[in-house]
Every structure is written in C-alpha cells, then in structure tokens.
Amino acid sequence: MVDKEEYRKRIIVTAGEIFRRYGFKKSSMDEIATALKMGKSSIYYYFASKEEIFKAVILYEANILRNELTTAIKSVESPIEKLRNYVFVRMKSFEKLSNYYNAIFDKNLNHFDFIESVRVKYDREELAILRLILYHGARQKVFNVPNSEFTALAVQTALKGLEVPLFWKKKDLNIEARLNGILDVLFNGILKK
C-alpha cells in the first residue's frame, strides 16, 4: 500500500532542496519530478501547483525551526542559557532552512497570500518566546527587565539586524563571534559600571 503522507514528505523535502539551490522562481516542476524519479502527473496528484509545494516546504521548515528552538530552550534551566541557546539555534537554523527564511524576509515573494500570514505568525511566536524567557529571567532576578514586551522587541530587532550580514552577503563571517558579541551587549550593556 502506498503511504500518501510519506510521498508528500519526499516531495516536500526534495522540492525544498531544489528551491534552496535555484530559488523559487527558477525552479520547475520538471526539476522536482526528475529529482524524485517520478512523472509530473504523480506530483500533481499530491500538490496542485509549484506554489502549493512551496507553501508546504515553508510550513515544513517552520515546524523544524519551532521544534529545534523548543528543544534548545528546554535543554537548559538558566534564563541566560535559554536566551543564548535561542539566539544561536535561531540564527544557525535560518542558515540551513533557507526556504523558510526567504519566505519570511524576501519582499519578491509578497505576491503569495500565505507568506504574509507566515511572517505575522513567525513574528508573534518569536516575540512570545523571547518575552517568556525574559519574564522568567526577571522573576528569577537574573535579568533587569522592567518591560519584557519592549525588551523582547528590542532583542528581536537586534537579531533581525544581524541576518543581513550573516545570510544575505554570504561572506565568511564568524557567526559565533558576532552572536557572542550581541549577547555580550544584551547581557552586559555598553555602559561602564
């Protein structure tokens, strides 16, 4: 018996690799079918269009990111380590989940209705996670955070600011050093004490 969900997942994973390599616009259903060693008609049985496959890829990668972040946060107790793990896993995951990252930040993909809802959901989820980490850190008297909502927004903004030099320019940058630098400013500030 053919496992429909297993075939869907194979299509999603393979299409994700092709989209990652060539970008959405330059990828074709023929390339996806060839990589899968299937006919295009077989793919159309599972997905109505390339856009529908792209949406499935984005949601699949979003789920991977969510699971990796949850695992990273739950793997440590200290609010400092939770925030550190969150930042490192987030930035490193975006590098390998480039379809999801591109869907969130590439303005050329705005014509897909689902992209805006993914962006809004991503921002909301990220702020909620950051707020929770900061709130618990403040309650444990580890963080001096009078307003976890504003601080979460500031952290999110700083992380988004790092994305351009880290991922769009594709230079050989020391990601760990940059992330440690931003965490140092975040944890210790710039004021001399």
Image (cartoon, rainbow, N blue to C red):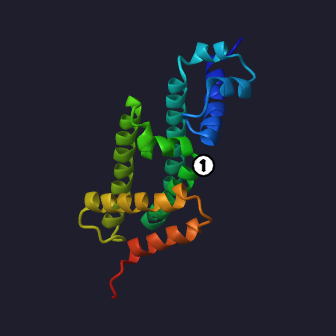
Quadrant of residue 20 in the image? top right
| Residue at which label 1 appears | 96
Secondary structure, mark 1, is: helix
- What amino acid is found at the position of numbered circle 1 in the picture? Lys
The 10 Å Cα crowd at callout 1, few under 14, some 14 to 19, many 20 or more, is: few
Residue drawn at 53 percent across, 16 percent down:
48
Image quadrant containing the C terminus: bottom left
Task: State the residue lying farthest toward the right.
Answer: 37
Q: Say whether residue 183 is left or right of residue 16.
A: left
Image vertical order of residue 61 relative to residue 36, above or below: below
Quadrant of residue 138 in the image? bottom left
Task: State the residue lying farthest toward the bottom.
Answer: 193
Query: In the depicted view, which residue is nearer to us: 17 or 65?
Result: 17
Mark yes or no: residue 25 visible.
Answer: yes
Position of residue 39 measured from the top left corner of the image (x, y, whole percent) = 70, 16
Q: Say whether residue 23 is left or right of residue 181.
A: right
Position of residue 56 measured from the top left corner of the image (x, y, whole percent) = 52, 29
Image quadrant containing the N terminus: top right
Position of residue 124 measured from the top left corner of the image (x, y, whole percent) = 34, 45
Residue drawn at 52 percent across, 45 percent down:
65
Task: State the residue lying farthest toward the front.
Answer: 26
